Image: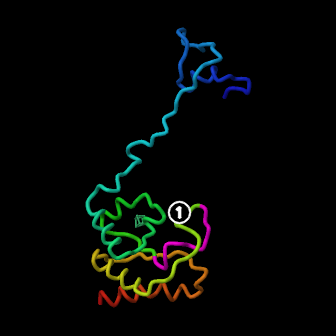
Amino acid sequence: MPNDSSSAADLLPILGGPAGADGGSCGSSAAVLPTVSRRLPPWLRQNLGAGGGHGETAGLIAELDLETVCSSAKCPNRLECWSAGTATFMILGNVCTRPCGFCSVPKGKTEALEADEPERVAEAARRLGLGHVVITSVTRDDRPGKNCLMSLPICSIRASTS
Ligand code: SF4
């Protein structure tokens, strides 16, 4: 590692920047540091509009006005999962009462509960033909009885598939 007395010109050859004709430092105090590309590599970028059944899953979720943790938490696997016709439903609204810094789910003032949400989740599960259904929810500290509310879509799914 260079010591603290190294100048930017000293570092340029290490960083792959311009060098003088003799391969050494150009000796100019006005040397320009190399530009570092901030573009993401192509394999890290996915077009959510492409790929199999992604649009159909997205359309069904929109039609039934459902929330998913896939979208709300900005999951990077969404193209893959939705193209395969699966998603993780998120119930009790799209706003969480916990301000966890690592999570992208919106936080703040919670929304009113929707009485028909369990039936809509059950319909989505039925129309997607899911063999198992993953349901999560935002934290509702304003609703201490959340555990009871979590059971409602499960009952609806069981009723619609039995
Ligand atoms: S189902 Fe799970 S892994 Fe797949 S996109 Fe949704 S949250 Fe991500």
Where residue 144 sits: x, y (%)? 60, 86
**Rendered-image quadrant of the C terminus:** bottom left
Where residue 143 sits: x, y (%)? 58, 84
Q: Is residue 64 above or below residue 155?
A: above
Q: How is the image coloured?
A: rainbow
Left or right side of 119 for 37: right
Dividing the picture into quadrants, the one containing residue 76 is bottom left
Seen at 61% across and 80% down, the residue is 141
Quadrant containing ligand 1: bottom left
Residue furthest left in the image: 52
Depth check: 11 or 109 in front? 109
Left or right side of 2 for 155: left
**Rendered-image quadrant of the N terminus:** top right
Seen at 42% across and 42% down, the residue is 41
Where residue 87 sits: x, y (%)? 37, 69
Seen at 52% across and 33% down, the residue is 36
Q: Which residues are magenta?
A: 91-101
The residue where tag 1 is placed is 104
On whether ligand 1 comes within 8 Å of the CB at mark 1, the answer is: no
Query: At label 1, which amino acid type do we have?
Result: Ser
Q: Main secondary structure of the magenta part?
A: loop
Seen at 41% across and 47% down, the residue is 44
Q: Is residue 8 above or below residue 152?
A: above
Where residue 22 sits: x, y (%)? 54, 9
